[in-house]
Image (spheres, helix red, strand yellow):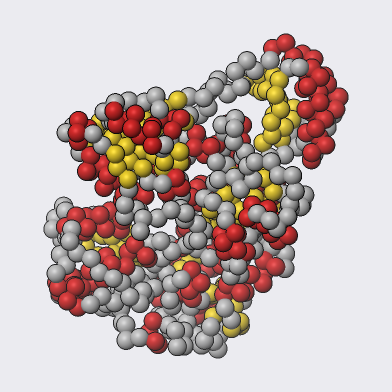
Amino acid sequence: MTGAGISTESGIRDYRSEGVGIYTATNHRPVIYADFLRSSVVRQRYWARNTAAWPLFSSFEPNIAHSYLSLLERKNKLHWLVTQNVDRLHQKAGSTRITELHGSMFGVVCLGCNLAISRQALQEKIQAENPNWSATPEELAPDGDVFVAEEKTRTFRAPSCDVCGGILKPDVVFFGDTVPKQKVELVTQKLMESDSLLVIGSSLQTYSSYRHVHHGVEKGLPTLIINIGPTRADTLADKIEGRIGEMFSWLTDRGSLVHMDLKDVVSQLEEIAPSRTAEGWDNVGLLVEPRRDAKVEHIFLTNDLTEEVLEEALQLRGKRVGLVISYHPPLFSPLKRLTQRSSKERILLKAIEAGVAIYSPHTAHDNLTGGVNDWLVSGLGEGKVIPLSVQQLAPGYPHLVTIRGVDGTEGFAALSDIVARERCGEVTSEGTDAVVLSNDRGLCSLLPAIKEKFPGNQITISATPKVLSSGSGRLLTLSQPASLSTMVERVKQHLQLAHVRLATSQSCKEHLITTVAVCAGSGDSVLQATSADLLLAGEMTHHRVLEAVSKGSCVILCDHSNTERGFLREFKEMLHKTLHSGVEVSVSLMDKDPLCVV
């Protein structure tokens, strides 16, 4: 059973910690259910404050404690999780066997017709009905409430149900409300099926949580409480007083469950976006391998790996970053030495010294279905999306031979020698697997030589894909044509930018936009042959822009990495779903485009 204390290290204050809890340090008190039902003024004030808080409240991420409990579930050590919290951080960490005792702030229900909608959908409805309203939130509470100046709430239009006009309420148990009977019975059942009870970060002051602890103790369940400060059940159970994040960091230090071997992480990354699908000029994949037996318990994502970003990764409180995934490869041009002379050299040396691996996907993610370019085009409107160009994968080599578990550089070198001797293909790698792209002539002579050199390795033969799953750039044909000003606003909102650069001609100003060609990063080569109404890229050369405008296209430029960085949030979710290991993933806060408008 978890309470507000488990989420404090994600940035959400708890209720009752001495001197810092929202109740002990402020005059804040939650809304009472009866007041919410009775008074339209109370509902107006509540929804105004909740609307101001939602962007921040919905953005919080799970911490090591959430991840550890999720891992225990996957290892069948955790039978059921009951949380008093409404922040959904357990689900974000991957927990599925869970009961939200007091509901979730991520859902909304109508008290008139029982319509259920997502909180994000309601946020969009509220913004449409209050286009000129805004407020700066202060003192965020664990229930998603904030302090907002009273005069701001008076001008706010509270939402109502679109179906019946009834009262909308977040899908949570307000103070003065009761937990549904079927939920209480389910928690009791799961408690009785368990061998023991662990309470984390709760003072157990509410009866809805305390009664389950009392019931478990009465039935003889060994019970342990981890919390800062007194709890209502201190006389009933064993207790450890301390910071929850430190406790779980201590556990991981002594026989960590929350890690993966680096080679396994790399294999998973190659399954998401194989390095062989990157552009030929690119340098992708595992660039720095500090040790053969390296472990990864925290992955750090960035668009550009600068010295400041690497320092940020190394200084994360209570977290040992084992792998930095840098979208742009920090190692591109060949280096003849590693000294302290240049930033690139210092980054590589510091990463190796700290035992941090570096991986870069770059254009493999650009070409990926669901990758960077698909993310970039997703905020521009509904319509049909196709690649601007489809890249042939190794033309002339119809056979793909995969050798599993090739050991180190010597194994790859031996394989390269075989292929060179037979003059029949190309060698590449996917994690610890070697891949040979072979022609028809060489396949018969190649296989016996490979089996002789690698007698214990699994070898498979398949047809080489004729094309990538997608390709370079994207062309969007809008279902509903839009004005240029509308498209500019969509780009700014999607990329969270205050300014973009725009090139237009008189002809393109006068027509609606029907087709949009996009290319994340540099768009020169990918966009040069297209005749779309609008071109969107991070950057293009002066003369390419002039040429596009002369052909009747408009051009929006956002600076190079601004068209890529937002994908890291999508990639983070991909990793959470793919790794299934409890490994934490975080995104750099220091990473930013080097250029800004002043």
Compared across the picture, whether 28 is left or right of 419 comes to left
Residue 382 at least partly seen: no
Quadrant where the C terminus is found in the figure: bottom left
Question: Which percent across, then down, holds residue 110?
Answer: 22, 60
Frontmost residue, 61 versus 309: 309
In terms of image quadrants, where is residue 552?
top left
Residue ranking furthest to the top: 441
Is any atom of residue 400 visible in this view? yes
- Judging depth in this view, the residue of 244 and 319 nearest the camera is 319
Q: Residue 374's x, y, as percent?
A: 42, 38
Residue at image x 77%, y 22%? 419
Q: Residue at x 73, y 60 (%)?
A: 353
Describe residue 548's horizontal placement relative to residue 270 as left or right: left
416 and 8: which is toward the camera: 416
Relative vertical location of residue 142 with respect to residue 375 in this rendering, above or below? below
Q: Residue at x 28, y 67 (%)?
A: 52
Residue 125, by quadrant, is bottom left
> Could you say which is closer to the camera, residue 401 or residue 166?
401
Quadrant in which residue 160 is drawn? bottom left
150 in relation to 99, above or below:
below
Q: Position of residue 85 (x, y in %)?
A: 42, 69
Residue 58, relative to residue 325: is it above or below?
A: below
- Name which residue lies at 25% across and 31% down: 514
Q: Position of residue 489 (x, y in %)?
A: 26, 47
Q: How many marks?
A: 0
